[in-house]
Amino acid sequence: MEKDNLIENVRLLKDAVDVVQLLFFGKDYLADVMSREIVLRLKEIRAESGINYVVHLPIDYDLMNNAVSPGTVLSSIESIITATAEIDVVSYILHIDRCVDFKYPAVVLGNESRERLKFVLDCLRPSLPWDKLHIENTGYDFTYFSDILSAADCTICMDAGHLHRTGKTVSGFMDVFGPNVKTAHIHGFLGERDHKAVVDTDPRFQNDVLPFLKDFRGTAIIEVFDKDDFCNSCECLAKYF
């Protein structure tokens, strides 16, 4: 896949998959990925191929930081939804965590973080197409907040690699969130680095990810950032599906 060339990457993927995730990486770089010209070209590709789009919202909203105004983030999300309306986005993926200069301070589990999450959800929910906003597990124990997420009718994006990095399992996550998981990010590891090719020699794939995928009826996305990793992942998964 071509680095930093969204349209070219979509063209390369459109005949290989049913859904392409558009990664809107940083909140200060949105003009690079959702200009009017880009959106119109994405619309053309969708009309030609039938491809569907998922939008991954900027990862640097830093919503678990008490100093960040959820209202500012809400305005940014609304602008993205408005700009991408005509490409019929299936879902919007949102991180609710810490992110400073694309580094990830730990989210400390406790009453303060629980109140912060409630506050963020209360601010976002009334103004957004809530069934299309999928909250992704990141670097902290998402299940700790399961009651809050459930009470807010949150739909979940389950990232298998993030679970394994934090010592959790897909099966355990599904026991908690089950039917609310509508999107899944699948990727493998190279040493400690995630978002690498899926390989079936990894017991985490065989024992945890593969059984999940066989039963999953939502949108599964191979979330890798390299053409070889993508092709190798597809080759691996094709053995089983």
Image: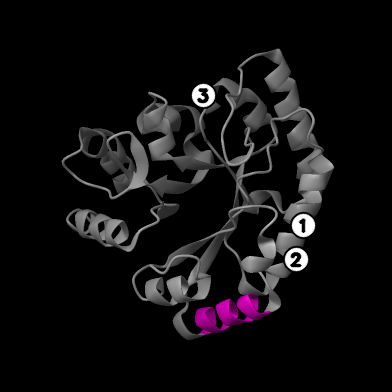
Q: Secondary structure at mark 1?
A: helix
User: In the image, is residue 44 part of the stretch drawn in magenta?
Assistant: yes
Residue range (magenta): 37-47
The type of residue carrying mark 2 is Thr
Residue 122 position (above or below residue 36) = above
Badge number at residue 78:
1
Q: Is residue 179 left or right of residue 113?
A: left
Say which of 156 and 230 sits in front.
230
Q: Secondary structure at mark 3?
A: loop
Q: Main secondary structure of the magenta part?
A: helix
- Residue at far top of view: 110
The type of residue carrying mark 3 is Asp
Residue 112 position (above or below residue 86) = above
> At x 59% / y 27%, what residue is drawn?
105
Badge number at residue 111:
none
Percent across and percent down for residue 183 are 48, 49
Mark 2 → mark 1, Cα distance in angstroms: 6 Å
Badge number at residue 82:
2
Q: What is the quadrant of residue 11 in the picture?
A: bottom left
Q: Is residue 104 left or right of residue 131?
A: left
Q: Which residue is mark 3?
A: 141
Mark closest to the chain's N terminus, 3 or 2: 2
Mark 3 → mark 2, Cα distance in angstroms: 32 Å
Say which of 27 and 166 sits in front.
27
Q: Is residue 42 left or right of residue 49?
A: right
Percent across and percent down for residue 218 are 45, 52
Q: Do the CB atoms of the residues marked 1 and 3 lie less than 8 Å apart?
A: no
